[in-house]
Amino acid sequence: MVIVNDLIAEFSVEQLRQFFRGKITKFKPKEENYDFLFEDKKEISDNFTDITNIGEAVLNNNDDLLIITAKTNKKLTNRSGKKRQYEIAKNILKEENNDAAFFIFYDEKGNFRFSFIRANFLGTKRDFTNFKRYTYFVSKEQTNKTFISQISKADFNDLDSIQEAFNVEPLTKQFYEKLQHWYFWAIDNVKFPDDAEKEKNGREIAIIRLITRLMFIWFMKVRKLVPENLFDEENIKKNLADFADEDSTYYKAILQNLFFATLNTKQADRKFRSE
């Protein structure tokens, strides 16, 4: 059985098909090309190829599920082509009249967007769930922690359970709980300059500032806006005279400068001083 990590490490349509075979009890592999649906839509046909139904299943409550893949002709990113991808999804669901579908858009590098769309029936009318709401962008260059956690434990035999796999609210709650625990730990363990401690609620204010700065710096790291080697312990030891755990050298020399000075320096010019 293909697990989520295998899919990320070496993405292919066949790997994906095997993944769904392991996740869905009544999965049936299929090979049906849908490129013909978009021959007169140049903005789609120029950007996507191999739009294919690779499998289908009848889930609990007799809900019909499709699994569609499509290759992008350009590099796939977190922000690219969602409108066109949604257009492809809606056209296929209208053509096939299924209850829901997974749509997996991928590029030649193995990056992929893993999306779920469900039909909503309102009397004689039919619309679809928000494409941006139920989607994950997956890349080997990212940790993909939320995707791995949510999809690994999800039950794909039920539409409600599938939809819940795209609900990140529990993970957000867990994050803030951990952040709260760290805050209270820091209240008792982190030391600040005397002037900060003398202010009313100075320690609490200083810790909140520290947390927001650290979160912002981590965001810059994840978005690759600052060099990765600034967070590499061995590299830092070579560039800092004192790197003891109990000292504040790393914060003052690296993190503080990242938050204040680096933001005002062009990315190409960001480097350690030579003296």
Image: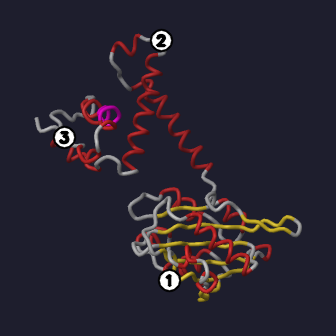
> Is 46 in front, or is 156?
46
Can I make out residue 1 in this image? no
Q: Tell me the CA gap for discs 2 and 1.
A: 62 Å
Where does label 3 land, which residue?
A: 272
**Position in image of residue 260 (x %, y %):** 33, 32
Q: Which amino acid does the dot numbered 1 rest on?
A: Glu
Secondary structure type for disc 3: loop
Local packing at callout 3 (Cα closer than 10 Å; few below 14, some 14-19, many 20+) is: few
Q: Which disc is residue 184 wearing? A: none
- The relative height of residue 265 versus residue 227 in the rendered view (above or below) is above
- The relative height of residue 187 versus residue 223 in the rendered view (above or below) is above
Q: Check if residue 98 falls in the magenta segment.
A: no
Q: Which residue is found at the position 23% from the left and 44% from the top?
A: 269
- The relative height of residue 49 versus residue 102 in the rendered view (above or below) is below
Where does label 1 land, which residue?
A: 14
**Position in image of residue 79 (x %, y %):** 50, 59
Q: Which disc is residue 200 wearing? A: 2
Q: Which residues are magenta?
A: 255-261
Frontmost of labels 1 and 3 is 3
Secondary structure type for disc 2: loop
